[in-house]
Image: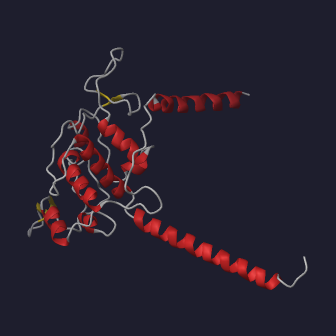
Amino acid sequence: MRLLALATLSLSLLAAPLAVAAGDAKHPEHQHWHWDGVFGQFDRGQLQRGFLVYKTVCAACHGMNLLSYRNLGDEGGPEFPEDAVKAIAAGYQVPSLDEDGQPAERPATPADRFKGPHPNEIAARAANNGALPPDLSVIVKARHGGADYIYALLTGYKDAPADMTMGAGMHYNPYFAGGQIAMAAPIASDDLVEYADGTKATKDQMARDVTAFLTWASEPRLEERKKLGVKVMAFTFVFALVLFMAYRRLWRDVPH
């Protein structure tokens, strides 16, 4: 009995922080995305616009450590031309060594990982009032609700309810657990970027575009998996049909 009581107490203590963390966050509404469905695919133009939003708005605080610049040219992704990928990478300086073996910097190449905004976690927290901005490489897979949640969070900032006491430096967002988030609204106004294809950079459009880019980053083989799945299902159907026809032929003269 004593062991059972201790086990119950331990479970309750473990569950308590989870319950607090879950809070009463608003459930995000499902949005229509180009990649939805069996035959859904990413919109290449949207992915390229999404990268621009990430680079301009998000990259000041959030890194994407699992991506290399060359991935921007991958099939099934943004598919930037090779020259564009090289130019994007060259716009960043990464650590290196000079001829004397001393610390130096050089322009990044497509083979380099995305350069983060901070050299380490301590610097990241110091620049964000103690909060640690999460890496966005797989953020869509890491958050319940996926793309719908990311979009809702980006567009969900509003004034806090009158009866809610906000912590210092916190911002109200009903889609975030507990309603209080340290990150200020990253997409606070229209025209934070200028799209090369002429698309109007409204807050909603920018939120959708960067959500699409982050979804691709989290699932870069999404289209490949869907194509493979369709082939497997087609093969399974044909195989089952052949087996059925063989069964009918072998057993047609056998009395039942």
Which residue sits furthest left? Answer: 99
The image position of residue 195, as x and y in percent, is: 16, 53
Judge whether residue 148 can be spotted in this image: yes
Q: In which quarter of the image is the N terminus?
A: top right
139 sits to left or right of 53: right
The image position of residue 77, as x and y in percent, is: 31, 64
29 sits to left or right of 94: right
Relative vertical location of residue 42 with respect to residue 232 in this rendering, above or below? above
The image position of residue 176, as x and y in percent, is: 38, 33
In which image quadrant can residue 51 be found?
bottom left
Judge whether residue 103 can be spotted in this image: no
How many discs mark residues in the rendered view? 0
Residue at 38 percent across and 47 percent down: it is 147
Q: Please name whichever residue, 170 or 220, is drawn nearer the observer in this view of the structure.
A: 220
Residue at 39 percent across and 57 percent down: it is 35
Q: Quadrant of the C terminus?
A: bottom right
Q: Please name whichever residue, 68 or 236, is drawn nearer the observer in this view of the structure.
A: 236
Which residue sits furthest right? Answer: 255
Question: Colour scheme in the image?
Answer: secondary structure
Relative vertical location of residue 169 with respect to residue 85 in this rendering, above or below? above
51 sits to left or right of 173: left
